[in-house]
Image (spheres, rainbow, N blue to C red):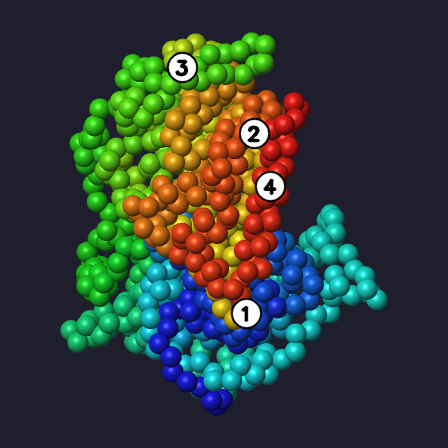
Amino acid sequence: MLKQKVIFESGNELASIACKQINYHIMGYYPITPSTQIAENLDLMRSEGESQTKLIAAEGEHSAAGICYGASVGGGRVFSATSANGLLYSLEQLPVQSGTRFPMVLNVACRTVSGPLSIKGDHSDIMYTLNTGWIILFAKDNQEVYDFNIIGLKLAEKVNLPVIIAFDGFFTSHQKKKAHIFENDKDIQDFLGECKREYTALNMESPVTIGSYMNEPDLMNNKFQLNLAMEEAKQYLPKLFDEYKEISGRVYTTTEGYLTKDADVLIFALGSTFETIKEAVDKMRKEGKKAGAFTSKVLRPWIVDDIYEMCKDTKILICLDRQDSYGAGGGNMSIEIKASLQEKELNTKVITRIYGLSGKDFYVEDGVKLFEEAFSCLEGKDVKRFDYLGKYEGDLKTQNTKFFNPIKEEDTKLNITKAEYNKQTNTFNVTGGSIKDITAMPKRIAAGHGACPGCGIPVNVNLLLSGIEGNVVLLFQTGCGMVVTTSYPKTAFKVNYVHNLFQNGAATLSGLLEMYKEKQKRGEMPQDDITFIMVSGDGGLDIGLGSALGAAIRNHNMIIFEYDNGGYMNTGYQLSYSTPKGARSSTSHIGEYEDGKEIFHKDNPQIFAATNIPYVATVAESHITDFVRKARKAQEYSKKFGLSYIKCLSACPLNWGDEPRFERAVIESAVKSCYHPLYEIEHGITTINYNPEDKGQKTPITDYLFKMGRTKHLKNEKYNHIIESIQKEVDRRWERLKARAESPYL
């Protein structure tokens, strides 16, 4: 055995420690709960010089998978982590990785796949990967997360297949437990051996083509070889477990049983639930009933012989599935186990129970009840072969409760702003919008939401809607704005509201409004006048930028409103492409070897302007009248000409590190320093709406940055080079903006 030490850490932390000790070359990632801590921990270790792994923040999981694939064909060791819809977003890339036979390790902190949206843990995500050609190991506890990350990489490099290390989100990923880790990183690296690849895309002496076009019979042969690699993994795993036992002292097998030899009733459960079932087994044994339990550590390759050995003497098997393969009478584990028992011609009765969806707790008492039900079945009582645990009858009266009266079109016709169309210039002139008048506009979002004190989201969305007259349909992408307003069964919205995920919001709203227009065209609905608005923030126009630009290029009659809070806030503040350069976040730490975010903030208004949409504008809560007038302009442009885009800075006191009562002053300093200049672009013509230079109010960028805790460290002289680079870039963008404003064409 090699020298080890005991630490007290979560599964996520142990995964990142294993990554650091292995010394991976590259981690491509995108933050998603509950796997995000892995990247956060690695970035912290990198900032302190403990890890050399290069972290590359993608704009979405699909690109993160592409980064990992590109890095792996370069011949190095590659690592990643994801969960739930992030895993599904990258799913297309998984067969590419396995089909071209490049090893890597992906940690999956298992979580509910939406919709409806839930961030709690179950197994509905990992089961989508069964047919991707990846080896899948399932860790039941924190120790196994650490060990399987080491074992998994050696297995991947032995058979040239990528490996997933799966574990329960929030249960295993976040709960801290004692675990043994190797004291010396070199011991792990020696166990793994040198990183060697027979083929890479970086060998100039022997160039290769990777991922060529393939027809039958070549593709058939390719997949057969992948199958052979899985068979090789099946044969090698027991030997690898023995090798690992020699250095760790820990014994692993592909399946793990508990009092299975003489059991009349067995319960099968993946992951952390297995430990709970073991306690239920002990209770049943004290009552003289022969109960047992088992779990599988390996989902791919599936090892039928091991399942047979566990079940060959039992009379009833209860298979617990933490997901459902809807319409199949069971989840994927039930289906696989039933097939295995049939192959071995066993007559074991299999009872399936769907449990624990969206992180619903499973207690020892639940296990006892299941055993009692199965034993009553042995005595002749009729028992359902398939059912859901913890389901309940819905209350239609509660579900249809009207929390408040809806906002009607006539309620919003207050003449707060007046829009006049100029036919010669194809532009709108909007007047009005005084603060006094704005307060008369009824709020489409009720006060009963769960946003943090000082959060800019409800402030900015309501300001936007103060300038919008008539009927409104809102679509929110995933983010804080969505989470804090729609906790089932209640809602804070007084108008029609739709949610879809980050990456597809604009496309969804495009489909909705085009259906509205088509049904009107066919006379299937009244000629109402509806303004369609997509609200995005929390980094939603990183991962969702492609969808949004697609909508812009198609020029749908809608508004995209971005509340830019400068980070992925709803996942705990990781860096977004909109985060200021040099800012501290949970994936851009400050340390001896890292100086916060490395790249400049993204300029979305100019990106959207490049699509030639009719209207682009920036707004700020510090300039309310300008804000409301532009909202009205956006509405008019969206009705007459097509897509409008508006961006505001939205304060996040929790993660910006400032006081809620001062947020308006913080936003104003961003405007006056020209970090967030106020301007609009109408049919390609730029107008600066507030020029701080003309009023003698222009301030240095430090006036904005030093007001926030996330960038206060930049006061230290050692970061002067960062301040200088930010100031230079802000000035460059400002000068370009002024040049555009002076041109009759820009």
| Viewer-side label of 2, 1 | 1
Q: Residue furthest front?
A: 696
The residue singled out by tag 4 in the image is 733
Q: Secondary structure at mark 3?
A: strand
Task: Report the side of 328 relative to 735 (left or right).
Answer: left
Label 4 neighbour load within 10 Å: few <14, some 14-19, many 20+: some
Q: Determine the image quadrant of residue 222.
A: bottom right
The residue singled out by tag 3 in the image is 418
- Tell me if I can see residue 80 in this picture: no
The residue singled out by tag 2 in the image is 552
**Above or below, comparing residue 486 to residue 301 in the picture:** above
Q: Residue at x 38, y 62 (%)?
A: 168
Task: Identify the mark nearer the N-term, 1 or 3.
Answer: 3
Task: Report the side of 547 relative to 437 (left or right).
Answer: right
| Viewer-side label of 2, 4 | 4
**Above or below, comparing residue 179 to residue 489 in the picture:** below
- Mark 4–mark 1 Cα distance, whole angstroms, equals 29 Å
Task: Report the side of 148 relative to 729 (left or right).
Answer: left
The residue singled out by tag 1 in the image is 593
* Residue 148 on image: x %, y %: 48, 72
Label 3 neighbour load within 10 Å: few <14, some 14-19, many 20+: some
- Mark 2–mark 1 Cα distance, whole angstroms, equals 40 Å
